[in-house]
């Protein structure tokens, strides 16, 4: 059976670097705000007391998030410096392509295009100096705008952004019923193979 503390912990985990407020957690779990605050305190103490836990609970501006303890910084640095990370993952390339073609763009806009959260990918791309902040949008919350860097151009051998490959002209009849070009092409290939 899932405990109430596990529910709060799981929500903090999936929220990533965005974190959640007590009000958000209260709405998502159905718990009263004082109960959520007590669970957050309990979770923070649990991590603090456990010498084998690398996690901690951070609270900035009434937004709570999970993070690694400060003493983990050298190990975390090794992760980002590891040779196997010289190649970009498909998810990283997807986020990078969206930024390259739509910049400047906010994380929420990227998430909307991808259909999943992109916070960790943005962090990795920023650490690798392929993207950086291009200011903030003049809207509530002042979301960060992202853009590609000069290093991005060097990394991909481009002189400027005008040299990016042209995007295909996607017509509505090239899409499946859900508006997915890839899925339509996959289904066509599947039917071709079945016919053989």
Image (cartoon, rainbow, N blue to C red):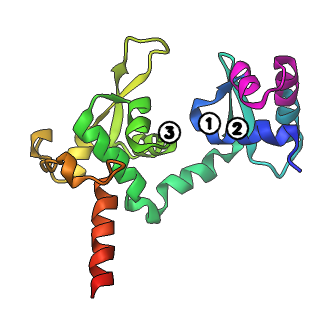
Type of secondary structure dominating the magenta stretch = helix
Q: CA distance from mark 1 to mark 3?
A: 9 Å
Q: Given contact means CB atoms under 8 Å apart, are the residues at marks 2 and 1 in contact?
A: yes
Q: Which residue is mark 3?
A: 119
> How many residues crowd mark 1 within 10 Å: few (<14), some (14–19), many (20+)?
some
Q: Residue at x 46, y 45 (%)?
A: 121
Q: CA distance from mark 2 to mark 3?
A: 15 Å
Pinpoint residue 2: horizontal percent, then vertical percent: 85, 47
Q: Given contact means CB atoms under 8 Å apart, are the residues at marks 2 and 3 in contact?
A: no
Q: Dividing the picture into quarters, in which one does residue 85 lie?
A: bottom left
Does residue 68 appear in this view?
A: no
Indicate left or right for 38 with 30 as reference. right
Q: Is residue 58 above or below residue 166?
A: above
Indicate left or right for 82 with 129 as reference. right
Which is more N-terminal, label 3 or label 1? 1
Pinpoint residue 46: horizontal percent, then vertical percent: 88, 39
Q: Residue at x 50, y 41 (%)?
A: 117
Dot 3: what SS? helix
Question: Which range of residues does the magenta coloring cover?
Answer: 22-40
Which is more N-terminal, label 3 or label 2? 2
Q: Which residue is mark 2?
A: 11
Dot 1: what SS? helix
């Amino acid at each position: 059976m899932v405990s109430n503390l596990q529910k709060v912990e799981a929500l903090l985990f999936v929220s990533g670097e965005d974190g959640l407020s007590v009000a958000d957690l209260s709405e998502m779990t159905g718990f009263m705000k004082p109960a959520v605050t007590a669970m957050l305190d309990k979770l923070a103490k649990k991590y603090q007391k456990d010498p084998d836990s690398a996690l901690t609970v951070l609270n900035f501006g009434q937004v709570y998030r999970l993070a690694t303890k400060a003493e983990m910084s050298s190990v975390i640095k090794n992760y980002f410096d590891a040779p196997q990370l010289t190649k970009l993952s498909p998810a990283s390339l997807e986020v990078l392509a969206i930024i390259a073609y739509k910049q400047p763009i906010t994380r929420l806009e990227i998430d909307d295009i991808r259909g999943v959260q992109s916070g960790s990918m943005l962090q990795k791309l920023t650490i690798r100096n392929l993207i950086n902040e291009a200011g903030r949008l003049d809207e509530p919350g002042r979301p960060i705008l992202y853009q590609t860097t000069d290093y991005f151009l060097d990394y991909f051998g481009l002189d400027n952004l005008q040299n990016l490959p042209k995007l295909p002209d996607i017509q509505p009849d090239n899409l499946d019923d859900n508006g997915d070009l890839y899925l339509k092409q996959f289904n066509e290939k599947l039917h071709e193979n079945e016919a053989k």
